[in-house]
């Protein structure tokens, strides 16, 4: 009898611990809810001196970002975006938090498809860099439920993996990191796409001229930039469409994966 009572008394604590690590679509990451204020954010994710950061941006009507580094797990951590001092978006890039289905950083696209059957796919053009595998970031978004997943290219497995699990207000327009700012641009792909070139929707890809790709490379080299490096103002003046630039990125990714030297 005593053992049963002890087990019952410990159950709420175990339940609370489990809830504190959950990502709930359209609602929360751990104990932080959408709509919470800045004070609550800093209570749950206290700033570590000379480590965590806070920024204010004038874009998209003005908003702020709090980045809490997960020093214990040596990983990116949590990014919180606020407007008018209220949380509008939470991005988790740490195994500390996961969905009820077990989705967290490094999860596979197959796991996402299994549990989220109504997602749309987008590419953030000009977001590719060494840190995310050299390819533009892909996002799978469930707007109705208020959850999105950032997919980077993992060179070790030659496939995409989840980096961030993102919670936002259901039914609202999702934008990565709170706002898309030039030279990055936001484009919809076919649902569950992982390949920007092959899956750009018809509207954005119908005018791609594959024969111009190598001319693009020649023009880029005039700026003295290695192919695959992040775009800057000089590169965007080349005069090619977003779809053509996406095609160029895809070709260069194939060449890099094959071990070919590219410039």
Image: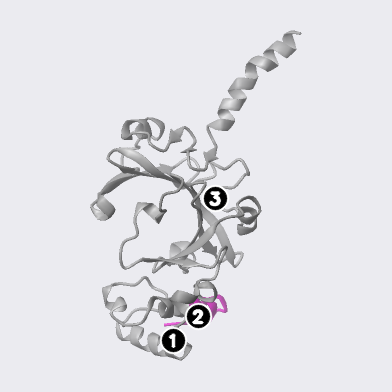
Q: Residue furthest top?
A: 2
Q: Earlier in the sequence, mark 1 or mark 2?
A: 1
**Mark 3, residues whose alpha carbon is within 10 Å: few (<14), some, or many (≥20)?**
many
**Colouring of the image:** one colour
Q: Position of residue 123 (x, y in %)?
A: 46, 65
Left or right: 21 with respect to 214? right
Give the residue pinned by disc 3: 105
Quarter of the figure with residue 159: bottom right
Give the residue pinned by disc 1: 213
Which range of residues does the magenta coloring cover?
250-263
On the question of residue 183 being in view, the answer is yes
Is residue 262 in the magenta section?
yes
Left or right: 5 with respect to 45? right
Q: Which mark is residue 251?
A: 2
Q: Earlier in the sequence, mark 3 or mark 2?
A: 3
Q: Position of residue 190 (x, y in %)?
A: 54, 68
State the separation of the CA atoms marked 1 and 2: 9 Å
For the residue pair 22 and 70, the one nearer the viewer reads as: 22
Q: Nearer the viewer, mark 1 or mark 3?
A: 1
Q: Is residue 223 above or below residue 156?
A: below
């Amino acid at each position: 009898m005593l053992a049963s009572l002890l087990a019952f008394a410990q159950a709420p604590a175990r339940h609370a611990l489990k809830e504190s690590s959950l990502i709930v679509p359209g609602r929360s990451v751990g104990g932080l809810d959408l709509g919470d204020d800045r004070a609550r954010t800093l209570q749950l994710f206290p700033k570590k001196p000379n480590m965590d950061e806070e920024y204010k941006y004038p874009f998209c009507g003005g908003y702020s970002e709090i980045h809490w580094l997960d020093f214990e797990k040596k990983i990116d951590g949590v990014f919180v975006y606020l407007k008018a001092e209220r949380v509008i978006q939470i991005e988790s890039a740490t195994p500390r938090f996961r969905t009820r289905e077990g989705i967290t950083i490094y999860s596979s696209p197959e796991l996402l498809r299994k549990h989220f059957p109504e997602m749309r796919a987008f590419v953030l053009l000009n977001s590719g860099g060494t840190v995310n595998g050299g390819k533009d970031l892909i996002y799978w978004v469930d707007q109705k439920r208020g959850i999105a997943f950032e997919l980077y290219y993992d060179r070790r497995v030659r496939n995409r993996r989840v980096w961030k699990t993102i919670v936002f207000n259901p039914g609202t327009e999702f934008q990565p990191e709170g706002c898309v700012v030039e030279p990055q641009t936001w484009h919809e792909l076919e649902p569950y796409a992982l390949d920007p070139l092959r899956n750009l929707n018809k509207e954005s890809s119908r005018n791609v001229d594959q024969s111009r790709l190598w001319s693009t490379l020649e023009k880029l080299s005039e700026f003295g930039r290695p192919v695959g490096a992040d775009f800057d103002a000089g590169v965007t003046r080349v005069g090619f469409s977003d779809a053509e630039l996406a095609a160029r990125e895809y070709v260069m990714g194939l060449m890099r994966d094959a071990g070919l030297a590219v410039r």
